[in-house]
Amino acid sequence: MSETPVDSDEVRHVADLARIDLDEEEVDRFAVQFADILSHFDALDDVPEVDAEADLVNVMRPDEVREGLTQEEALQNAPETEDGYFKGPSVS
């Protein structure tokens, strides 16, 4: 496995994108960790390809139409309702 070098500028750039403040010690530590993570991705190149099955078969059962809940049954345990609908908190 070849280790992919990650420099501190790349770490700072990623940290800026994520809006994370890192000190120099953290930048150095993350550079090493990122390089290690990328080396794991490099290892995927060594995995042999396998022949995939061309035709997929649906193993699910067919849909069946069944009677559902009435509106009253669906709302009976709701903490709050309004005009026959679930009422949630206001979002500003």
Image (cartoon, helix red, strand yellow):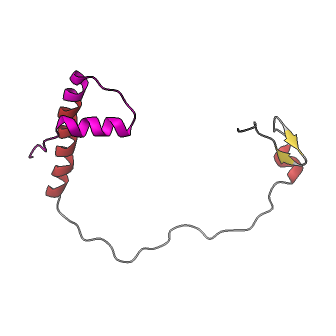
**Would you place residue 29 above or below residue 47 in this image?**
above
Q: Is residue 57 magenta?
A: no
Front residue (pair 61, 13): 13
Q: Is residue 8 left or right of residue 76?
A: left
User: What span is colored magenta in the figure?
Assistant: 1-29
Q: Is residue 19 left or right of residue 43?
A: right
**Would you place residue 47 above or below residue 6 in this image?**
below
Q: Residue at x 16, y 57 (%)?
A: 45
**Would you place residue 77 above or below residue 66 in this image?**
above
Q: Residue at x 29, y 39 (%)?
A: 13
**Residue occupying the far left of the picture:** 2
Q: Is residue 14 magenta?
A: yes
Name the spot of residue 72 as percent of width and height, x first. 89, 48
Name the spot of residue 70 as percent of width and height, x first. 86, 54
Using the rendered view, name the quadrant where residue 11 is placed: top left
Front residue (pair 29, 2): 29
Front residue (pair 87, 58): 87
Using the rendered view, name the quadrant where residue 32 is placed: top left
